[in-house]
Image (tube, rainbow, N blue to C red):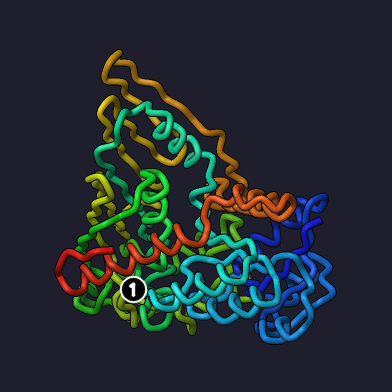
Amino acid sequence: MVRYAIVGAGQRGAGYAGWIGRHGDRARVVAVAEPRARQREALTREHGVAQVFSSWQELAARPRLADVAIVSTQDAEHVEPAIALAGKGYHLLVEKPLAPTADECTRLVDAVTRSGVLFAVCHVMRYRPYTRLVKRLVDDGRLGEVMSVDHVEPVGHWHYAHSYVRGNWRRSDQASFMLLAKSGHDIDWLRHVVGKPVERVSSFGSLRHFRRASQPVGAADRCLDCAVEPTCPYSASRLYLGMLREGRTGWPVSVLTDEVTEEGVTEALRTGPYGRCVYACDNDVVDHQVVAMEFADGVTATFTMTGFTPHQDRQTRIFGTRGYLEGDGEAVRVHDFTSGAVETLTAGLETEEGHGGGDAGLMDAFTRAVETGDAGHILSGALESLESHLTVFAAERSRVLGRVELV
């Protein structure tokens, strides 16, 4: 039985705890550390946790209570608890991004590596059944030698507005810049699939649309007061009240208020950050960005992050010397250049689990690594995850400074 401590009982921590609860024959939540009373009490009740703390410092001050600590605090609050808990002998799962700066990421990885504990970054996209399928096709040589990759992250217009205009990740000084906060998964995914390190990057992007200059004439600063709201694609009223009326009471509606009723959500729209006009917020992260990468041996890749799409899965094209692959997160189509055949393959997604089965895949792999003492089950280890983080920082430097950057 693998014992887990949850450090940060928000959406991610509660999600991982949910997997643990569904696999009680293998794992159990035995401790939780969370400063917010509602989240702490909810997780404590759901999992019958006896060891409950209002801070990670309180947990770290005690003798080791669990085999694994999951650090799922806010981005800027990963480094200190991870280092302290590794020093106590906890194996560690740490949410991405590791930290808001390259130096902090390196410090965390160096300290955890010295501690000798099992460690994984929650790069859950590596663990998706879909990813395993794509990776197997590439590694088996079905495409020949990979020459280049084109990968798109369609964030989705309402998701972008929720999280990156109105929400907690809207400002780089309060969370992190967009490429790190959202698309670190994708840069890491490309590194994993290509199987080679990135050597050079260049990037372009900006905050072009979600700013005051784009606000329609006659619009108010809150959707509930706005004459333009009925024709606005980013209407908070339509989004959150519409979801609530359809019976959707979880994310993203539950982020607005503890009282997930029509009255509670309406009050949150009237007074809270999620009711603001998307053109009248204090956001500063980019709403579109492209990254060009050169891997070892001259393999190239392009990555596009955009907030101007439906809410859908990533789209990928891989160009090889013997074949071509296109995938949509559910299925891949492989075009064989020799035979002319086109084969469609699916991965059997665990759609009830987060990130297309990636959350479940990560938790299963890490639990198995602890059960067996075999780190080979972990696909997102310390050094390669640090490498993909450093690629993200180099890309952002390129965007800001307007030059090609070495990784």
Question: Which image quarter holds the C terminus?
Answer: bottom left
Q: Residue at x 46, y 37 (%)?
A: 330
Residue at x-position 59% and y-position 53%: 359
Residue 240 in the image: above or below residue 150: below
In depth, the one of 204 and 263 nearer the eye is 204
Residue 223 visible in the displayed image: no
| Of the pair 21 and 85, the residue shown nearer to us | 85
Residue that numbered label 1 is attached to: 278
Q: Whole-percent x and y of residue 74?
A: 53, 76
Residue 203 relative to residue 66: left or right: left
Dividing the picture into quadrants, the one containing residue 82 is bottom right
Residue lying furthest top in this view?
Answer: 339
Q: List x then y, in percent, for residue 367.
A: 69, 53
List x then y, in percent, for residue 182.
Answer: 41, 63
Is residue 84 among the parts visible in the rendering? yes
Tell me which corner region of the image, top left, top right, bottom left or bottom right, holds residue 276.
bottom left
Q: Nearer the viewer, residue 101 or 12?
A: 101
Front residue of 241/148: it is 148
User: Circle 1: is it few (<14), some (14-19), or many (20+) Cα within 10 Å?
Assistant: many
The kind of residue tagged 1 is Val
* Vertical placement of residue 407 versus 282, above or below: above
Residue plotted at (29% across, 36% down): 146
- Residue at (82, 56) in percent of width and height: 1
